[in-house]
Amino acid sequence: MELNDLQAQRAAKLARLRTDGISPFPTRSARTHSITEVLTHFDDLAAAATPVTVAGRIVGARRIMGKIAFAHIEDGTGTLQLWISRADLGDTWFERFRDELDSFDIVEATGTLRRTKVGEPSVFVHTLGLLAKTVNPPPEKWAGLTDIEERHRQRYLDLIVNPEVRAVFQARAAAISAMRRVLDTGGFLEVETPVLQPIYGGAAARPFTTHHNALGQQLYLRIATELYLKRLIVGGLPGVYEIGKNFRNEGVDRSHNPEFTMMECYQAYADYTTMMRLVEDLLRAMCLAVNGVTTATFQAQTLDFGPAWPRLPMRAAIAEHTGLDIGSLSEIGTLHAAIAANGLKVERKPTWAKQVDELFSAYVQPLLVQPTFIIDYPVALSPLAKRKPDDPTFTERFEAFAVGMELGNAFTELNDPFDQEQRFLDQGRDFAAGDDEAHQMDVDYLNALLYGMPPTGGLGMGIDRILMVLADRPNIREVILFPHLRQREA
RNA sequence: GGGCCGGUAGCUCAGUGGUAGAGCACCUGACUUUUAAUCAGAGGGUCGAGGGUUCGAUCCCCUCCCGGCUCACCA
């Protein structure tokens, strides 16, 4: 390790401590109380003159004035002041504190509890010990660590010095826990399915490709869990869900990370209307877990997850905002012509389905600020969803939106193996037409459907994006502990 | 990938075609109730990398690397 001047100074102190027979990294702490325990019972412990041993990282400056010193330590549960006097501690350890210990070192202190004359709860230390010497210096005292890249690369440091970062990840844990409670009590079994898949599927995306050496087999990192979870519905499980990472080999921006956390669930004998109610229940519970109320504020916009969400058919939504009826413009040629004739500014797409998706993304999606379901997607956009009984060109599918972001995707699952086979074949034609995200044929999945899958409702929700909305973080990197970053040159 | 902005001390940032600056941190000294402790003093730089122009480049030009925001694509 190459050390800069400040690191070298601290390393020299570390070496001197070793020379004095003080381990810079002792095996364990003799802590008797967490800081929050001390603070909660402070007056009782103080009145009883009970000695306590607390431990934590020295945060802020050590304030040393001749024969007395102050420092604050933080242990993850709270912050507490140490009152350190040469008279109580003795010359050796007082000078050791002054000369060999630094801000950010992790220490333990034994003493009795008293308030200082300004009333601050403090440990009046009579025994001090080092638990872990710190070589890296802390960031600047006031501006702190603000560089976004450094915050994400050194998340450990970000967590030390920026308390609100810890709050985001506590909120994340609380939201996922609430999600699990809703699903567990709703009759869903939590399962795990393969990350390494010989055929990728369940979504429209480019995969990461990898290789199994011993088997000589090409494998893909999953882009969705959908097809495996539906095999479990075929297997007779009445409801399943999985919360886990998906991997998509796409661009990186403020709402996309190459690996992201998805919850997918499937319920036998249900349909997409069941899933809409489930989404409402999930978001309400997650919002409550994060914010204590069923409303959330995202970038000064108040979102209400309390009531049922509006349900807006995609065909009507596109017609309202573009004037085009995709129901009657069912060929790629006539759709392109209508887009040109109406002066709509959208990228030209190779397939009808992609073009409809483009129209929606450009003209409708940004307007969906409040929680909204867009329902009934064209069949060509939805190769795994069941057709509407009264209009076979559309499917029983919805996507859940808020603040212009897609939070979830659900449908009444296609269980007709012959229709499914045809959809896969159509996707193959789209792939040939230039859609490199088109779905792969999955013969084993068709075989499962040939054993019969009951009518089923299925749902996928992007956990990271939900957290962005609920915790008011406009960048996905702020809700992922270690977001993907470009590799730094050596 | 395109556009805009940026990369200078450990951190946060100024700045200039002529020997590199501040605050905080760090180091030395003083100080027995501090809360951004205070006071006095000292040290610390491949100015992102490479090339070019120039007597001289951290500054001007070119290329590249990295980052932020943004547009495009994807959840």
Image: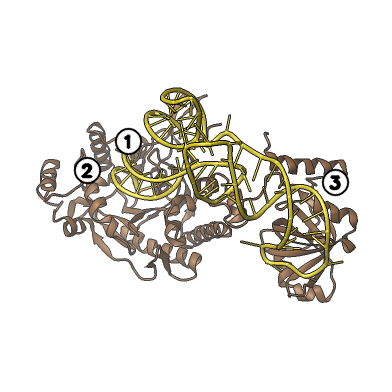
- Taking A102 as reference, is A269 left or right? left
Decide which of tag 2 and tag 1 comes sooner along the chain.
Answer: 2
Which one is in front, A358 or A20?
Answer: A20
Image quadrant in which the N terminus of chain A is located: top right
Residue named by callout 3: A22
Which one is in front, B73 or A104?
Answer: A104
Q: Report helix, strand or loop for mark 3.
A: loop
Q: Who's the residue at 24% across and 31% down the image? A: A432
Q: Report helix, strand or loop for mark 1.
A: loop
Q: Who's the residue at 79% across and 53% down the image? A: A29
How many discs appear? 3
Chain B colour is yellow
Q: Which amino acid type is marked by label 3?
A: Ile
Q: Does residue B40 lie above or below A436 as drawn?
A: below
Residue named by callout 1: A440
Do the residues marked 2 and 1 share a common chain? yes
- Taking A50 as reference, is A360 left or right? left
Chain A colour is brown
Query: Which label number is shown at residue A489?
Result: none
Find the distance from the CA under tag 3 to the CA under tag 2.
68 Å
Residue named by callout 2: A347
Q: Which amino acid type is marked by label 2?
A: Glu
Disc 3 crowd, CA 10 A, few/some/many (<14, 14-19, 20+) = some
Disc 2 crowd, CA 10 A, few/some/many (<14, 14-19, 20+) = few
Decide which of tag 3 and tag 2 comes sooner along the chain.
Answer: 3
Spot occupied by residue A439 in the image (x, y as percentages of width and height): 31, 38
Image quadrant in which the C terminus of chain A is located: top right
Q: Who's the residue at 19% across and 43% down the image? A: A352
Q: Report helix, strand or loop for mark 2.
A: loop
Label 1 or label 3, whichever lies nearer to me, is: 3
